[in-house]
């Protein structure tokens, strides 16, 4: 059973050095400095938050889902998880988690995958890959720089035969994850616009991101 660790009482909204409201379906990015703690809050519940991390000084070093799963020996991310880069370095460490289910295997929705999964009528719906491409382009990157991502709050059970299915999320309004940066990182978010499967409860909603300085 996951050992949930609650946030520190010192992490109040008033003490935050960054406080961002991300609308439903929108992209977002910000830099988290080494030692800072970032909270991603699922403000309304059942909202998948697709997230990528890049070394803020060298974008060629970025989040690796394979290295992260291998380091933990687990398919899911929760308290204590070391979020690893493709260079085998710790980018962040998850220090608090009130939900307990976060996927890093199912990837991001795209117009192409929507068409395959849900039919040609969905081809022109906005998707996470679109959001990622829009947001990384602001930092001089392209679609080639969009790697497999973390899906915070997305519930993807993995069966013994390795079958994966996206099912109803278990996150409640106000659930959150908190991570402490082990290096300066660029965090890129797609507040998932998917409406064809239950990852967002078929109703995309806003989220909140807060950042605090190291408490030591």
Image: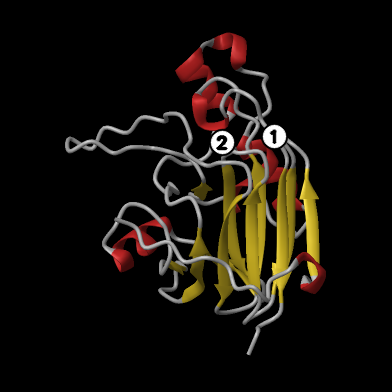
Q: Residue at x 41, y 69 (%)?
A: 80
Residue corresponding to mark 2: 46
Q: Position of residue 199 (x, y in %)?
A: 52, 31
Identify which residue is drawn at 58% across, 62% down: 53
- Residue 178, labelled with which disc? none
Which residue does the numbered mark 1 point to in the structure image?
205
Residue 166 image point, x, y percent:
42, 30
Residue drawn at 50 percent across, 70 percent down: 95
91 left or right of 66 in image: right
**Image quarter of residue 8:** bottom right
Q: Depth check: 196 or 178 in front?
A: 178
Mark 1 touches mark 2? (CB < 8 Å):
yes
Q: Which SS class for mark 1?
A: loop
Residue 133 percent across, percent down from the top left: 68, 44
Q: Nearer the viewer, residue 59 or 38?
A: 38
Answer with the quarter of the image where residue 209 lies.
Answer: bottom right
Residue count near mark 1 (Cα–Cα under 10 Å), binned few <14, some 14–19, many ≥20: many
Q: Quadrant of the C terminus?
A: bottom right
Q: CA distance from mark 1 to mark 2?
A: 9 Å
């Amino acid at each position: 059973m996951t050992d949930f660790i609650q946030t520190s009482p010192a992490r109040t909204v008033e003490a935050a050095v960054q406080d961002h409201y991300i609308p439903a379906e929108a992209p977002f990015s910000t830099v988290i400095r080494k030692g800072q703690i970032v909270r991603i809050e699922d403000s309304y519940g059942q909202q998948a938050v697709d997230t990528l991390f890049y070394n803020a000084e060298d974008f060629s070093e970025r989040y690796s889902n394979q290295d992260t799963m291998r380091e933990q020996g687990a398919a899911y991310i929760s308290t204590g998880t070391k979020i690893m880069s493709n260079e085998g370095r710790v980018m962040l460490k998850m220090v608090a988690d009130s939900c307990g289910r976060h996927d890093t295997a199912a990837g991001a929705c795209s117009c192409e995958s929507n068409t395959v999964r849900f039919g040609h009528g969905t081809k022109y719906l906005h998707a996470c890959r679109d959001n990622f491409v829009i947001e990384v382009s602001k930092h001089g990157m392209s679609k080639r720089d969009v790697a497999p991502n973390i899906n915070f709050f997305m519930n993807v059970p993995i069966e013994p035969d390795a079958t994966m299915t996206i099912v109803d999320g278990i996150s409640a309004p106000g659930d959150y994850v908190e991570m402490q940066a082990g290096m300066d990182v660029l965090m890129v978010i797609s507040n998932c616009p998917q409406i064809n499967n239950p990852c967002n409860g078929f109703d995309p909603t806003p989220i909140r991101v807060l950042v605090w300085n190291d408490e030591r």
